[in-house]
Image: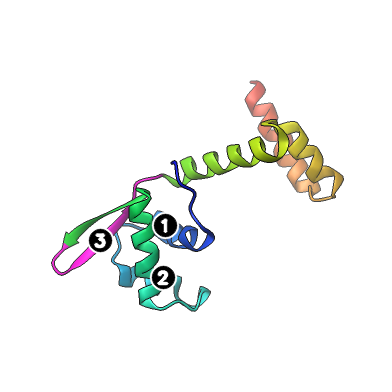
Amino acid sequence: MAERISDAEHTVMEVLWDEAPLTAQDVSERIGTERDWSANTVKTLLGRLLAKNVIAHEADGRRYLYRPLVAREDYVAGESRRLMDRLFGGKLTPLVAHLAERDEITKQDIAEIEALLKGLKS
């Protein structure tokens, strides 16, 4: 994925990753009260995502059905890599150390990381 997506566009993507294909109206209803957006705002965001080639649409009568072209997992992997590259020289250890130094890692997090590492070793 070449172009970054904004926070607002990401909200729309989350809806489409959860369920697709959807009409603009469907997307608008699912975002609902989370954001105070008009249907036109949602249509504008869908247009931007189409232009960035992260979603596609197909005609369904007089309306369009939208679906993601980028998997959520691929997007998360790309954003995670970008964050590590930009802030931590592409290395995971300084990121974890940064979080640990700020007491942002809980005992539960540590247990889950240990289990993950144990699984990766075997």
Q: Amino acid at mark 2?
A: Arg
Residue at the (86%, 44%) spot, across then down: 101
Q: Which of these two is toward me, 99 or 117?
A: 99
The number of callouts visible is 3
Specify the principal SS of the magenta part.
Answer: strand
Residue at the (84%, 49%) spot, across then down: 102
Q: Residues within 10 Å of mark 1 (few under 14, many from 20)?
A: few
Q: Amino acid at mark 3?
A: Leu
Residue at the (66%, 31%) spot, across then down: 90
How far apart marks 2 and 3 lie (CA) works out to 15 Å
Residue 64 image offset from top left, x and y in percent: 23, 63
Query: Disc 2 designates what residue?
Result: 30
The magenta stretch spans residue 90: no
Q: Is residue 48 left or right of residue 56?
A: right
Q: Amino acid at mark 1?
A: Asp
Query: Disc 3 designates what residue?
Result: 65
How far apart marks 1 and 3 lie (CA) works out to 14 Å
The magenta stretch spans residue 69: yes
Q: Which of the labelled discs sits on residue 18, or is there none?
A: 1
Q: Earlier in the sequence, mark 1 or mark 3?
A: 1
Residue at the (79%, 45%) spot, across then down: 99
The magenta span reads 60-70
Q: Which of these two is toward me, 23 or 48?
A: 48
Q: Is residue 61 left or right of residue 1?
A: left
Q: Is residue 13 above or below residue 37?
A: above
